[in-house]
Image (spheres, grey):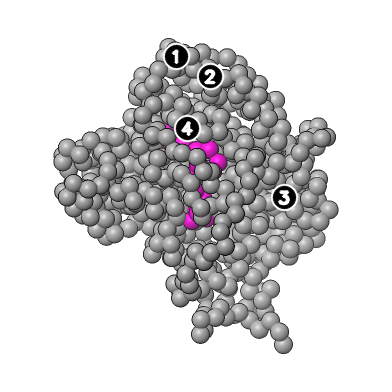
Amino acid sequence: MSLPAAPAATVAELVRGLAAKRYSSVELTRAYLDRVAAAQPELNAFITVTGEAALAAAARADEARAAGRGGPLTGVPLAHKDIFCTEGVLTTCGSKMLANFVSPYDATVVAGLRQAGTVMLGKLNMDEFAMGSSNETSYFGPVRNPWDTARVPGGSSGGSAAAVAARIAPAATATDTGGSIRQPAALCGVTGIKPTYGRVSRYGMIAFASSLDQGGLITVSAEDAALLLGPMSGFDPRDSTSVDSPVPDYTATLADSLDGLTIGLVKEFFDDGLDAECGARIREAIAVLEKQGARVREVSCPNLPLSVPTYYVVAPAECSSNLARFDGVRFGHRCESPKNLTDLYSRSRGEGFGAEVKRRIMTGTYVLSAGYYDAYYLKAQRVRQLISADFARAFGECDLLLGPTSPTPAFRIGDKCDDPITMYLNDIYTIGANLAGLPGMSLPCGFVGGLPVGLQLIGPHFSEARMLNAAHRYQMETDWHLRVPAAFA
Amino acid sequence: MSLNRADIENIARLARLELTEAEIPVYVDSLSRIFAFVGELDRAPTTGIAPMAHPLPGLAQRLRPDEVAETDHRELYQRNAPRVEAGLYVVPKVIE
């Protein structure tokens, strides 16, 4: 496989190149579309490529720039996770259920990034309904990790992470319910940010677990994330949990000094489950941050080890309610010749959903059913409160928390398919932030056996600017985020 | 905690999911494992702890003025429907 050269290393570089007229948006878009086409058989990162529409949008971006209109992002190509509704374009959520669904409207995130002038290359592969940690549950087949195509890219935003890692898209949107941005970012050696719950609108983002879902980004660098996060953030009256608070300019504070920043090392994140070599990479990263002026102290979140069982009650409960809308009546898959209405519902859903989605719907149905609600659902909500309180206490002592993103580097495709619990435990370090609604990031911090390792930062609510600042300072001193897998260089 | 075949059939019926014969033992096994795993929560003392339904407590549900904000998009929306006649969604007969 040989790929045409990537036009630039980062979005920041594309922004400068477009402004200096080193290339047009049409040239850029064509170059990325060529890379997408060359890499698709190997990676399967895309579900839909919208080449013609992308070139037309790029031509409009070039016209706008020529007329002196547009902003810094005008003409920058990117790709959207296929969980975001895109008007007139197939939006499958990685499921047979929506394999023929053409969205009649745009998600707020998609509209915001379009208004900022970005050009959509297409829609990215993902675990079905974002339920998975390896991208193996997609109806459209697994995505492969560009660092080793026998391995998973992580999930559920596996297409987003693989596309950015292989530089076939300069940046990608993604979503995170229990780690679905941060874990694939870690496994593919790219930067991922999950903002505070309520920061980014969920309108048009197909719902999995509504009290946990949050849209965000997978990019090469923290600087790229800062450039793109603004246009996709902010209050949206169409999302009842959108938070009405001003969006800062995330690029303004990127290079601020880290003097006086206190970083808490979460004791529970450095447990027996953490691969020793991965742990060593995290310790090396801590030393880099200390050299930048950060102070480091150990903190404890004693209830954090209960975050995975808490999540596997709360998330399936919300999933079973949200996915009740897929009934074979108004949109989505419908079975052949239904005998009656119940048969229509049951067979359409039985055929349209994959194995993991059915498992979660049934888990959720059970914990919400009469006689079990208190024992499982209310109990989990109480433990969720304890976990959130642990974080709140920790943030009384420090500004950001730090730990690994994932216990191991990328595993082999098929290795963890037999036991759901083994798969669920991949998200042991990421789920806590979702339960508490906190922003989190994953940054590339080195390699183990040729595979990338991710460092996780977690901040208090609405501390994205501070987190991006720490991440950017780290990336000024290191170049792990600029490494590209040899086959895709 | 262990579930049996009848439990799985009942849950699937409540969830309106038709399962194949081959799927049932798979879910008996994996749901039993999941409930054994989440049973760990019993160890956490939670007396007097309020259940947390929302990650940003204190955020009140907003109300909007009672004004028409949406126009009719029926035709556009029905383009995704499996079966439509005369602007109506067609399903099997419900009332004999």
Relative to B68, residue A286 above or below = above
Three-letter residue code for mark 1: Asp
Q: Residue at coordinates 70% horizontally, 36% vertically from top-left? A: A385
Q: Can the viewer see residue A280?
A: no
Three-letter residue code for mark 4: Glu
- Which dot, 3 or 2, sits closer to the camera? 2
Distance CA(mark 2)–CA(mark 1): 11 Å
Distance CA(mark 4)–CA(mark 2): 15 Å
Distance CA(mark 4)–CA(mark 1): 18 Å
Crowd rating for badge 1 (residues with CA inside 10 Å; few <14, some 14–19, many 20+): few
Q: Residue at coordinates 36% horizontally, 29% vertically from top-left? A: A252
Distance CA(mark 3)–CA(mark 1): 49 Å
Marking on residue B31? 3
Q: Is residue A27 left or right of residue A243?
A: left
Marking on residue A259? 1
Q: Position of residue B91 (x, y in %)?
A: 60, 79
Three-letter residue code for mark 2: Ile
Magenta range is A188-206
Q: Can the viewer see residue A86?
A: yes
Marking on residue B21? none
Please name the residue that numbered disc 4 is placed on.
Answer: A464
| Observer-nearest of A422 and A127 | A127
Crowd rating for badge 3 (residues with CA inside 10 Å; few <14, some 14–19, many 20+): many
